[in-house]
Image: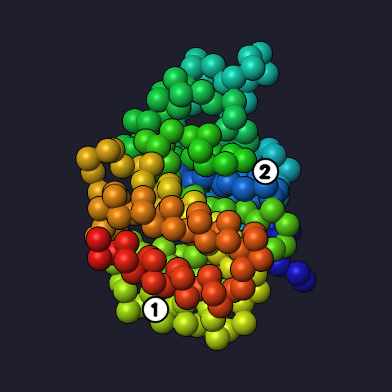
Amino acid sequence: MKMWTIEGNEGLAEEIRAAAGRDALGSAYILSGGGSRGEAGRYLAAAMECRGERPPCGVCAACRKVRAGIHPDVVVVEDAEHKNISTEVLRAVRSDAYILPNEGRRKVYLFPDCSRLDAKSQNVLLKVLEEGPAHAAFLFCAQTSAQLLPTIRSRCVTLRLAEGAEEGPAERDRAERLCSLLLGGDTLGLAAFFTAVETGKMKREELQALLTETRDRIVQALAETGPGGRPADSRLSRRQLTGMADVLERQIRQLRFNLGVGHVAGALSVELARCMRE
Ligand SMILES: [Zn+2]
C-alpha cells in the first residue's frame, strides 16, 4: 500500500516521518509557502499522535481521527465570530495547553491561517511557546512566515512547502548548505560550492530558486535578532550578512536579465567571499 504523504511535498513528508520515527519532533512549527498547508498540518499532527509503525502511518485509529478532523487532542484554532482570532480564544488555548491530552500522545494546536493572528494575539502565545509543557505542540500555517512576529518565529522550526513541484528536497538541501557556509564564514567551502554550480550544469531557474531561498533565510536570520545582536549560528556580523543579502539580491536580478549561470556563480563566489573578509 502507498504510504501517506503530502502531495507535492513528498520530500518534506519523508523528513517529518524520519523525525517522528526518531521521536525527534519539536513542539512548535511554522508551515509556510503556497502548497497545501492544511494537509501538511494534519500530516504533522498525525505524526505526533500516531501509534502505528513509521508514523504517521495513516491507518491507525489516531491517524484516522486526525485525518477526519475528530481527534480530541488535535485542536484547530479558529474564531468564527471575529475577523481576527480574539485574545480570549487564545487565552483559552494557553490554559488548555497545560491540561494533559485526553487520549493522544500530545496536545496539538493547529492554526490554519496565521493572517488571522495579529501581533497582540501572538503575544498571548509567546510564553506557552517558550516554556509550555512538553506534551503541547503548536503548528502555524502561514502563507509566509513574515505573518508571525520574529519572537514567535525564533521559537519555531519553519517547514517550507513547495508552491508546485519545483522546490524539491534537492533545492532545500542546497540552500541549507549554502546558508551554513555563509553564516559560518567558510570561504573555501563557498568557492567549492560555486565551482560545483558552474560545472554541474545547474539550470538558470534552479540557481534563481536557490539564491532566492538563501536570501530569504539570511533575511529571516537577520530579522530574528535585534539591531545590536548577531544572528544565532553565525560567525559574521549583521553588517556582513546584510551585505550578503544585497549581493544575492543583485545576482538574482542579473539572472532575470539573462546573464549565464557560470557568470553569476563566478561573481557570487568572489563577492560573497569579499563580504566575509570585510
Ligand atoms: Zn498512525
Q: CA distance from mark 1 to mark 2?
A: 40 Å
Q: Is residue 173 visible?
A: no
What residue would you read off at disc 1? Answer: 191
Q: Determine whether 79 is above or below 230 in the image.
A: above
* Residue with the most extreme bottom position: 199
Position of residue 239 measured from the top left corner of the image (x, y, whole percent): 29, 50
Q: Determine whether 250 is above or below 105 in the image.
A: below
Q: Which image quarter: residue 110?
A: top right
Amino acid carrying label 1: it is Ala
Nearer to the camera, 255 or 225: 255
Q: Disc 2 on helix, strand or loop?
A: helix
Nearer to the camera, 36 or 187: 187
Colour convention: rainbow
Q: What residue is at 54 percent from the left and 81 percent from the top?
A: 198
Q: Which comes before the other along the chain, label 1 or label 2?
A: 2
Mark 2 residue crowding within 10 angstroms, few (<14) / some (14–19) / many (20+): some
Q: What residue is at 41 percent from the left and 63 percent from the top?
A: 179
Mark 1 residue crowding within 10 angstroms, few (<14) / some (14–19) / many (20+): some
Whether disc 1's CB lies below 8 Å from ligand 1 is answered no
Q: What residue is at 43 percent from the left and 41 percent from the top?
A: 153
What residue would you read off at disc 2? Answer: 38
Position of residue 245 measured from the top left corner of the image (x, y, whole percent): 42, 53
Q: Determine whether 14 is above or below 239 in the image.
A: below
* Residue with the most extreme right position: 1
Of circles 1 and 2, the one toward us is: 1
Q: Is residue 221 left or right of residue 261?
A: left
Amino acid carrying label 2: it is Gly
Q: Which image quarter: residue 2?
A: bottom right
